[in-house]
Image (cartoon, grey):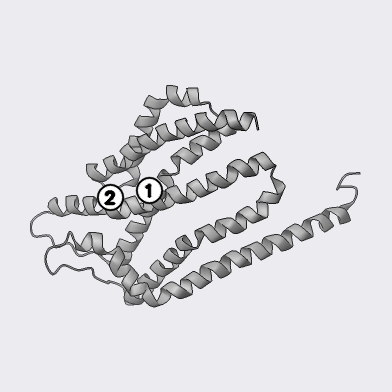
Amino acid sequence: MSFADDPESLVGGLIPHLLELRMRILRALIGVGIVLAATMPFSNQLYGWLAQPLLRSLPAGGQLIATGVASPFVTPIKLSFFVALMAAMPWVLYQAWAFVAPGLYQRERRIASPLLASAMALFYIGCAFAYFAVLPAAFVFLAHTTPPGVARMTDINAYLDFVLVIFFAFGLSFELPVALVIAVLMGVVTTRQLREWRGYAVVAIFILAAIITPPDIVSQLMLAIPMCLLYEAGILVARALKPNIATA
């Protein structure tokens, strides 16, 4: 007898899953809310820390400006929300994992958990690399190319939006090895094909870097070169994992 023949069984089977999903979403939101409440009192300090790469590249006495009436209040709060979301992301992903894990086979759980942890770590590494290496280099380059007589006066909200885009761009770009490993394990591609496509991948990486980074060669190279190395790392990890999964 199918679910179509017994709709009550279908509804009865869905209700426990929907209740569990609601509980997991509530727990995730509560986790983000707790971290947000902890970061809100330090929102101005957080913004001051975030602004350091730009401030260090400005002339003596240079500073950011606020062109919006409420920007001095709203922008740090906006930053606190993103900081809370990123800090609580392991808890949010754990709730998602706890919801889907019971439906996976043991071998799938064994490989999915390290991939999830690696993806989270690589995202954080990408954001840290962008803050400590890419942004300072990009702002120094832009400072040296500013025409004479032009004062660099950046709006605080525009700066925050710019930095968040860079963070997400580098964080997601550093997920390349995980994406390659998943593609190989799912049978979409093979490690041999990835090696054969290496030349095309390098060209695509440099094009992507030129699109998502600031318009300077320094930041483009600082994204493209690590991505090329991560592409090779993804091939090596996928080649090491594939036989183990096949025999599991």
- Which badge, 1 or 2, is on the more N-terminal residue? 2
User: SS at mark 2?
Assistant: helix
Q: Residue at x 43, y 64 (%)?
A: 82
Q: Quadrant of residue 186?
A: top right
Q: Name the residue at 27% across, 71% down.
A: 67
Please indicate, yes or no, whether residue 187 appears anywhere in the rendered image. no
| Residue picked out by circle 1 | 170
> What secondary structure is found at the residue carrying circle 1?
helix
Residue type beneath disc 2: Val
Can you give x and y, in whole percent of width and height, for residue 200 in the image?
Answer: 39, 27
Please, what is the three-letter code of the amino acid marked with disc 1? Phe
Q: Which residue is mark 2?
A: 134
The image quadrant where one finds the C terminus is top right
What is the CA distance from the residue labelled 1 to the residue labelled 2?
Answer: 10 Å
Relative placement, left or right, of 28 versus 74 is right
Q: Residue at x 43, y 22 (%)?
A: 196
Q: Are marks 1 and 2 in contact (CB under 8 Å)?
A: yes
**Seen from this angle, which residue lies furthest left?**
148
Residue in view at x 58 percent, y 33 percent? 185
Q: Is residue 37 left or right of residue 220?
A: right
Is residue 39 placed above or below 18 in the rendered structure?
below
Pinpoint residue 183: horizontal percent, then vertical percent. 54, 34
Residue 153: x, y in percent?
Answer: 20, 65
